[in-house]
Amino acid sequence: MREKSWIVLILLLAPINFLMSLDRHAISIAMPVIRKDLGFSVAEASFILSCATWGYSLLQPLSGWLAERMGPRRVLFGAAFLWSLATFVSPLCLGFAPFLLARFGMGAAQAPDWASSMLVLKQRFAAASRSRANALLLGFIYLGSIVSGPLTSWLMLAYSWKLAFALFGAFGIVISVYWLVCYRDPPESIRGRRCLWRPAQVAGNCFARRDSG
């Protein structure tokens, strides 16, 4: 069971967190080229750079509730898929308002990532090893930020900024589907959510079944 938890962390949870940290430096590196290509002013560029944080901050209070209510499997899939979709369509947004909206949506989609990831660690790791799992996950997040700089620069110089963002988005869509197909919420957490959110009489039956087992 312990080995399986580490496999889940390294092969399933870490790639999603690595993915959604790629954009942290990518947009800053690409913005001078984006400004020139799309004709954004300095003020417009500053709004674009910060609006992902707006979306992330505004949706953050809801993210923990969503993870508890729906389970990290579905919530992380939705977060990664919508993040990837917003990233993928960014090169198609040729005006200020559409580009701003895409960036805001990307930040909002990323909001449930950390709360859901922490719930996975809580469900699958004992308290004694949870700090090591958390540290490893943070390492993958910062690795994504480190890799995004040179990778984005190379893609921009060799091809274009549009291709860089399209590739990040396409990669994210693949990762999100990979997560949905391969990950399963622990059965005990699913039973607990059903007991909590079903009507009272169904909840009573559910708790009765658990007590009898």
Image (cartoon, rainbow, N blue to C red):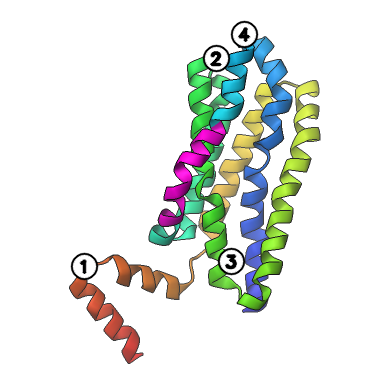
Which mark lies nearer to you, 1 or 2?
Answer: 1
Magenta segment boundaries in residue numbering: 52-66
* Residue at image point 22% right, 73% down: 202
* Badge 4 amino acid: Gly
Residues at discs 1 and 2 in contact (Cβ within 8 Å)? no
Do callouts 2 and 4 mark residues in contact (Cβ within 8 Å)? Answer: no
Numbered disc in front, either 2 or 4? 4
* Mark 1 and mark 2: Cα distance apart in space: 48 Å
Q: Above or below — where is 203 with respect to 138?
A: below
Going from N to C along the chain, the mark reached first, 3 or 4, is: 4
Q: Marks 2/3: CA distance?
A: 40 Å
Please indicate whether residue 69 sits to the left or right of residue 47 in the image.
Answer: left
Cα distance between the residues tagged 2 and 4: 9 Å
Callout 1: helix, strand or loop?
A: loop
Q: Check disc 3: other Cα within 10 Å, few if <14, some if 14-19, many if 20+.
A: many
Disc 4 designates what residue? 39
| Residue projecting furthest to the top | 39
Q: CA distance from mark 3 to mark 1?
A: 29 Å
Inter-mark Cα distance, 3 to 4 = 44 Å
Q: Is residue 63 magenta?
A: yes
- The local crowd at label 4, few if under 14, some if 14 to 19, many if 20 or more residues have their Cα within 10 Å, is some
Q: Amino acid at mark 3?
A: Leu
Tell me where residue 147 appears, x and y as whole percent. Answer: 77, 41
Task: Point out which mark residue 199 bears.
Answer: 1
Q: Looking at numbered disc 1 in the image, what kind of residue is underneath it?
A: Pro
Instruction: Mark yes or no: residue 98 visible.
Output: yes
First reached walking from the N terminus: tag 2 or tag 3: 2
* Residue 25 falls in image quadrant: top right
Can you identify the residue that label 2 sits on?
Answer: 94
Task: Return the x and y of residue 10 as percentages of the image width and height.
Answer: 69, 61
Q: Position of residue 132 (x, y in %)?
A: 71, 68
* Vertical side of 129 occupied by 95: above or below: above
